Amino acid sequence: MGLRPALRTAIRQAIRTAFRRAAPVALAVLAAASAPGASLAEQEVSGKLSLETRWFPRSAEFDRQRSYNAGLVAEPQLYVKGAENFSVTVAPFFRVDAADRTWTHADLREAYALLNGPLGDAEWELRLGVDRVFWGVAETRNLVDIVNQTDLVENPNEKVKLGQPMAHLTLSGDWGAAEFFVMSFHRLRTFPGAAGRLRPQLRIDNGRATYESPAEEWHLDFAARYSNAFGPLDLGLSVFDGTGREPVMRPVFRLVQGQPAPVALAPHYEQIRQFGLDAQLTVESWLLKLEAIHRSGASNIAGKKEDYAAFVAGGEYTFSGVFESDADLSLLAEWLIDGRRHRATNQYQNDLFFGVRLSLNDVGSTAFTLGALYDLDYGTRTMSLEFDRQLTDSVSVKAEAILMLHVGGADAVVRPSRRDSFVGAKLAYSF
Amino acid sequence: MKSLVRIAVPAVSACCLVLAAVFAAAHPAGAASPEEAGLKIARDAYDRDRGFGNFTARQTMVLRNKRGQESRRRLRIKVLETEGAGNKSLFVFDRPRSVKGTAFLIHSHNKKADDQWLYLPALKRVKRISSSNRSGSFMGSEFSYEDLGAQEVGKYTYKYLRDEACGKRTCTLVEQVPTAKRSGYRRQLVWRDKQDLRVWKVVYYNRRNAHMKTLTFDKYELYLDRFWRAGEMKMVNRLTGKSTDMLWSDYKFGTDLKESEFTRTGLKRAR
């Protein structure tokens, strides 16, 4: 190995550990700030401690996979207001897991400075640093949400995100909001380790991750979004140009008994461009939702570049004051389709979702959600159940279950997870 | 997360309850009919509270069930009066701690339904939510969205009944009937004092015309020499035995609130 490749490897390792290392530093800053006598302009330490457990009742599909995990999650947050239009927010994330070593991890979810000020009749806002940004309206899957990397260790639902370093400028006025993003320091998607469930058969080796761009994780990514509300319609138009957040998996071969055999999967991150649209129409008890994207530069499941379009369309209707009580009952339905269909890299290539949510609107904000996802191409059926309730002012409980009712024989994406139905519970303390 | 949304759905222009509190009128002398007299009272009261500009305040709600068990809600409120279009309001929750940082933005309208957005800090997500659920409970309290919502004159038809003693004062008693078909009420009785034009009591009758709730006002203070605000509002539900005390503090008028705080971009910054 020459000097340059060795140096590059060293730098890459440094980058990848930076976020884990930064989290304890952030914690130290937080501790210092919350120490008695610390006098910063206006500061606040808050956050959440959670105990979580997940149990997989069915025996594992692959060797080494465990049937349960239990862990402690800490999500402290420090907010310091420096001046009227200047503040700093630091929010690290820690998980200590009893069962799976790869689940024990730290991340810097947020560490940014926020400035804002007037600009004629409008205003500007600048966020500099590590931040999370959410785009989208749908219940099941947020296609347009592309700024942050997904944390699949935390939850398979693709809704937990890692922090992303960025400069984020927003100009907003009567005409809506225009946002501009410059991002670098690409984050690798996290995956469950060998002991984890909900993973492919082959181990995903982030140490072998590669990039299409010679600049690798330093590539400058750009994004922009325009959003506005036109009466009952909330509309967002977005574009992203840079290193994709979703990797294509490339098998890593090794000689096994003289024959090359795949032993792991190496994520490969390509240069993509994505146009997105998200819209919600809110009329009386109806919410009608649409998310649509067009992505170019990404590979399909066969490893071939294929431009494609995908969308989620659906809605929600709420009956309020049902059963002669304060409870609300909402019916949800969404259709998800990916133009690549059987060449799609995700499970939502042609799926229907139906859901029911009952919110009691009581002191504990008790809510039950039941959802069913049906794959129109492969016949795969999954069901999700969720229960949320606040027990006291600072303690809340959540229970969830994902049931793999049936996995179609040809459903290559979901097949490895077919025995991974689970029941989870979470007890959270907010401070 | 979803529970947060549900807490949020019966969102509120709580400020406007205060507007209701200053509904008042002089004796409707010379009014031709009880209906016209009632309408005049409502109009006078509404006009009288225009021009406050903006204010900020803190609110604590003490919720009691029929066994007397208490739980608390705490929030901060900012309200901006706008020309003609209706008010813009921002609510940020401090308690319960599990929903701390959750914020609401409401753009009230005179005729059409209000626009409401909810900010969920854990997800950094802004959600547009429906404002059609008028009779639902606000954060598990005995106040409904309808009780707290903008009290525009056109939202009721009125009938002046009589003058009555209320404490040391003399009040007008007006019956008002909601015009919205989704209202949770058949009618309401409203007592307003004739001297200082403040609401002291409202009795709510449900759709079956049963006396459902009683709201009383107390600890009025005068701001900017013109705007009365109640420091305490107590809502008692006669049917369930539950009650909610809504306590107001730290009223500040004429602050430097900016229009840009009441946008979806501003909502993400609210704290």
Image (cartoon, coloured by chain):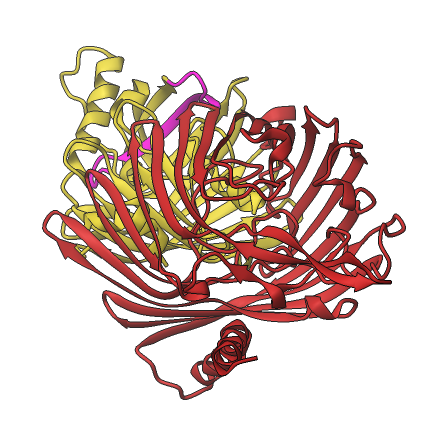
Chain colours: A red, B yellow
Location of residue A202 with respect to B116 vertically, above or below: below
Q: Is residue A36 visible?
A: yes
Q: Quadrant of residue A408?
A: top right
- Which quadrant is the N terminus of chain A positioned in? bottom right
Determine the residue positioned at 61% across, 65% down: A208
Q: Quadrant of residue B25?
A: top left
Q: Nearer the viewer, residue A146 or A117?
A: A146
Estimate the x, y position of residue B92 in percent, counting from the top left. Answer: 39, 53
Say whether residue A66 is left or right of residue A287: right
Please give the range of residues in magenta. Answer: B180-199
- The residue at the far left in this view is A120
Asked whether residue B192 is drawn in magenta, I would say yes
Asked whether residue A62 is drawn in magenta, I would say no
- The residue at the far bottom in this view is A37
- Which quadrant is the C terminus of chain A positioned in? bottom right
Estimate the x, y position of residue B49 in percent, counting from the top left. Answer: 19, 39
Location of residue B180 with respect to B139 vertically, above or below: above
Say whether residue A51 is left or right of residue A40: right
Q: How many numbered marks, from 0 up?
A: 0
- The residue at the far top in this view is B32
Q: Nearer the viewer, residue A94 or A130?
A: A130
Determine the residue positioned at 53% across, 72% down: A16
Location of residue A93 with respect to A223 vertically, above or below: below
